[in-house]
Amino acid sequence: MRILLADSGGGMRGGQWQTLYLARGLRDSGDSVRMLASGDLLAAARAEGFDAAPFGAAALWRWSRWADIAHAQDARSHTAAALLRTGPLVVSRRVGFPIRPGAASRWKYRRAGKYIAISRYVARVLAAGGVAPERIVVVPDGVPEPASPQLALPERPVQFLALRTNDPMKGDDLLRNAAALSGIGVTWSTRIAKDLPNARVFVYISRSEGLGSAALLAMANGAAVLASRVGGLEEAVEHEKNGLLVENRPDAIAAAMSRLAGDSALACSLAASGRERVQREFSLAKMVDGTAEVYRSVLQ
């Protein structure tokens, strides 16, 4: 297949990493992949030898004529592809925000042949917004296996790790208040892929989440996960089985932090179960294969 992946995000957040993982997997499977991207993702794609150009209307119009199928990865690329793409179109939906009402939105959401929802929660949001269920396929995110051996969990130097972000939908303020209540220090990171192998617990507090690829990455790296009981995080983390879920209140978060800090056996058990589940259900191969199957169904 000739596949065009379009992602307008300027940073390198979870969605952009998923686009890059997908591009790698499709190329490894023998497909021809071109990418329209911005910022860090564009630089990464070019560094890895992909035929990649800056995201924009002219490039999208031109390259979409080359592609057997176009795949929009975010809201802005979805809008552009709906306007400019004449052939088969697939759209990934990664967020849990409701679809905006109105005629323009209804027209836009009629344009794609299939919508890939990263969780059952996101699929329900799409259906509630008027997308026919038969046009929605759930393909969860995939995360890579760690490249190097890991320290045993009790030996890891960082006790609690959290993602540093300026996203207002994340709960940095809640976690800071919880850390003050519990008296437990939190290490804040902007490079969690590098820092997770040194962390015992990854704390992921969010007000809205489509699935939570950062939580999945933490599980893959053998860290115990403490996350908000919101959206798709309830599908990524099974409470008391492979992580802990909490309400978005500083006192609840603080109590769970204290529990994990004081019970090394629990933290180790959750971490081990989490890693097993990611290997079984959230591998990169499973994400790539599931996406390619959606492409084939649209092209039939």
Image (spheres, rainbow, N blue to C red):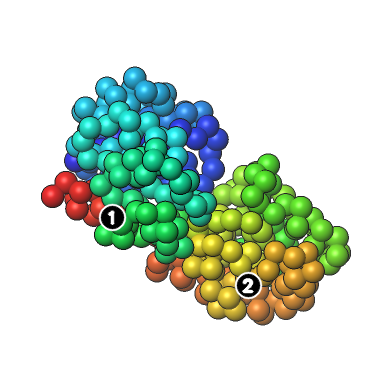
Amino acid of disc 1:
Arg
Quarter of the rendering containing residue 13: top right
Residue at position x 76%, y 52% from top? 173
Q: Residue furthest left?
A: 300
Describe residue 284's horizontal placement relative to residue 97 as left or right: left
Residue position for label 1: 135
Quarter of the rendering containing residue 45: top left
Mark 2 or mark 1: name the one nearer the start of the chain.
Answer: 1
Near mark 2 (Cα within 10 A), the count class, few <14, some 14-19 or many ≥20, is: many
Which of the pair 180/279 is nearer the observer? 180
Residue at position x 44%, y 35% from top? 76
Give the x, y percent position of residue 176.
Answer: 79, 55
Describe residue 246's horizontal placement relative to residue 83 as left or right: right
195 versus 85 height, above or below: below
Under tag 2, what secondary structure?
strand
**Residue 220 appears in the figure:** no
Residue at position x 21%, y 28% from top? 66
Disc number placed over residue 39 in the picture, else none:
none
Residue at position x 25%, y 53% from top? 294
**Residue 57 appears in the figure:** yes
Give the x, y percent position of residue 152.
Answer: 62, 68
Under tag 1, what secondary structure?
helix
Cα distance in 3D space between marks 2 and 1: 33 Å
Give the x, y percent position of residue 213.
Answer: 51, 55
Near mark 1 (Cα within 10 A), the count class, few <14, some 14-19 or many ≥20, is: some
Q: Residue furthest top?
A: 58
Residue position for label 2: 244
